[in-house]
Image: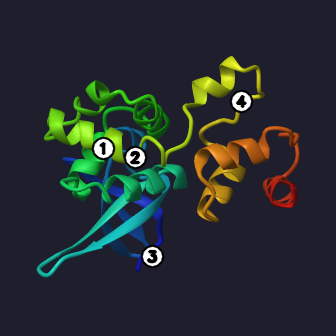
Amino acid sequence: MIAHVNGVVAEKFANSVIVDVHDVGYEVQVAAGDFDAALLGEPVKFYTYHHIREQSQDLFGFSSLAAKKLFELLITVQGVGPKAALSILSVGDSEQVRNAIANSDSAYVSKASGVGKKIAERVVVDLSDKVGLAVTVAHASGVASVSAGDEALEALMALGYSLNDASAALENIPKDLSTAERVTQALRS
């Protein structure tokens, strides 16, 4: 399996980015936000999901580990394949999509190209309890916010924590510490 691709953006077309890694080009299908952020000739890193079918292999890329984990949750829903999941993640950034699912906002999910009302409702029903509480709930309670691009948060989620559990573990840990120190303290608490 290919876990991530780190290289230079060689080409862009449709919803794909060709990443040149030591003279080998990997075609990575990405969400709209990642496509727009990828600039020709600039370095880029995508966490990847390697989808293997009988007649093809596809790489789906994500600028954050949290987006990849959300993608992996989306494709567990009956009727949602990798392309539909990528379409859902293209509606907004991964945190907006996660919040919409956590808040049971199927109308937001149904804005995705190729995703109808039934599939959107199934996504919300199947995943609302798996994605954790919406980040806005944490803000309203006065708890220090944890940013969506937080590397310590992503590391805890990679270790199997849900967004809600990872956020709770990090809420009282100073943000000025290194990522490794924050993760270590969160694991101890």
Left of 117 or right of it: where is 18? right
Q: Mark 1 to mark 4: distance in Å?
A: 26 Å
Left of 102 or right of it: where is 57? left
According to the image, label 4 marks what residue? 145
Residue at disc 1, secondary structure: helix
Specify the quadrant of the image occupied by residue 157: bottom right
Q: Mark 4 to mark 2: distance in Å?
A: 23 Å
Residue at disc 2, secondary structure: helix
Residue at disc 3, secondary structure: loop
Labelled pair 3, 2 in contact (Cβ < 8 Å) = no
Q: Report the amino acid beneath label 2.
A: Leu
Front: mark 1 or 4: 1
Q: Mark 3 to mark 2: distance in Å?
A: 39 Å
The picture places residue 33, in percent across and down from the top left corner, at 38, 38
The picture places residue 128, in percent across and down from the top left corner, at 43, 40
1 above or below 125? below
Labelled pair 1, 4 in contact (Cβ < 8 Å) = no
Of labels 4 and 2, earlier in sequence is 2
Type of colouring: rainbow
Of labels 1 and 3, earlier in sequence is 3
Front: mark 4 or 2: 2
Q: Report the amino acid beneath label 3.
A: His
According to the image, label 1 marks what residue? 123
Q: Mark 1 to mark 2: distance in Å?
A: 6 Å
Q: Please give the name of the residue rendered at 40% of the width and 46% of the height, measured from the top-left corner.
A: 127
Q: Report the amino acid beneath label 4.
A: Ser
Quarter holding the N terminus is: bottom left
Q: Mark 3 to mark 4: distance in Å?
A: 39 Å
According to the image, label 3 marks what residue? 22
61 above or below 148? below
In the rendering, which numbered label is found on residue 88?
none
In the rendering, which numbered label is found on residue 127?
2
